[in-house]
Image: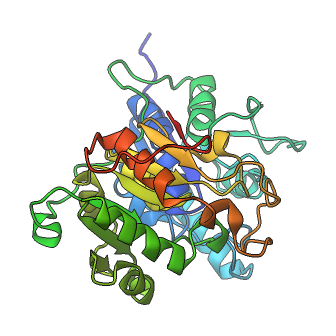
Amino acid sequence: MTPSRPPRTLVVRLDSAGDVLLAGPAVRAVAAGSSYTALLCGPQGTAAGRMLPGVDDVLTFDAPWVGLEPPPVTRAGTRRLMETLTAGRFDRALVLVSYHQSPLPAALLLKLAGIGRTAADCEDYPGALLDRRHRRRPHRHEALAALDLARAEGFPVPPGDDGRLRVLPPPSTGHLTGPEPYVVLHPGAAVPARAWTPGRAARAVAALSAAGHRVVVTGGPAERELTARVAGRRALDLGGATDLPHLAGVLAGARAVVAGNTGPAHLAAAVGTPVVSLFAPVVPADRWAPYGVPHVLLGDPHAACAQTRARHCPVPGHPCLDGIGDAEVLAAVAALTGHPADRGEQTERGAAV
């Protein structure tokens, strides 16, 4: 009997760049067992999707049920997606969602496009929309939950794959950073509650510089004003100077990265750089902490904003993150880099992993 060919598989992850990066280990597992692997992303995740090993093609769809400012539902947009998916001749699809999201809108469109088998983590009754209604383990990290679903669908982690985050080799960025060792501080985040206020970030730059670190401040094109304020005269300002692959190169060259719970923290993990994670408890750290690299979580996990998923801090003064002291930051960097000039005393809010 002639063995059946490996399937043509679609992986769906419609959220941000950080979410797509966390899906990377599952995507590699799927690719190892498929003849062709495509990734369906939202606009904010497309660039990250193109950086994932194992992906043959990246498709983009701005889903009306995803994002902070979703587009309207239109027949034309839905029709274009259906035509693209039908042309892909996919045998099966995995829909990856966060623990609080439903995969069912995507699953409905996949079925209408003729994809024979679909699987997803799902708490809601899926009817005929899912062929595998997988149940996520409680408090499972997002990267591990995606791997669990892939494994349940017959896509184990391939031999020799450590299951960590990974991207294609980034371009050289020495011309941007210079050759001397440096620490990156990334002050921005799409969700303001998950980052320091600008003034607090600027004070951290001053403390790191005074402790003997060369600091590089990073940010996107829309964050140039923020990075200029935070860098001041004490740090190299690369705000707006990098696309996502070049940002990966800058992060790969750093001794450590200081960032909130945002995409660049996961990008740092994907290039193997230790992370000082300024983690606001608006979402749970056990699901969203930097994955697969040494890291230190800083922030008050018991703050009043815990588990609220708030976009803007509901507590005056943003104490869960702005309350982190300079000594904690310096101690976290020391724990990850062994830098002799920054042996601050680590408090109980910092825990090396």
Q: Residue at x 34, y 66 (%)?
A: 244
Q: Nearer the viewer, residue 304 or 128?
A: 304
Is 220 placed left or right of 284 in the picture? left
Rendered location of residue 252, percent (x, y): 26, 52
In the rendered image, the vertical position of residue 153 relative to residue 116, given as above or below: above
Given residues 268 and 178, the one toward you in this image is 178
Q: Position of residue 112 (x, y in %)?
A: 71, 56
| Residue 152 percent across, percent down from the top left | 63, 24
State the scheme by which the image is colored: rainbow
Above or below, comparing residue 267 to residue 317 in the picture: above
| Residue 250 quadrant | bottom left
Residue furthest bottom as drawn: 225
Given residues 305 and 112, the one toward you in this image is: 305
Residue 45 can be seen, yes or no = yes
Nearer to me, 174 or 27: 174
Q: Looking at the image, which residue sits at the far top?
A: 1
Vertical arrangement, residue 219 with respect to residue 135, above or below: below
Quadrant into which the N terminus falls: top left
Q: Residue at x 42, y 27 (%)?
A: 5
User: Does the rendering let one see residue 95?
Assistant: no
Residue drawn at x 41%, y 41% as measured from the top left: 165
Q: Position of 216 compared to 265: left or right?
A: left
Q: How many marks?
A: 0
Residue 179: horizontal and vertical position, in percent?
9, 61
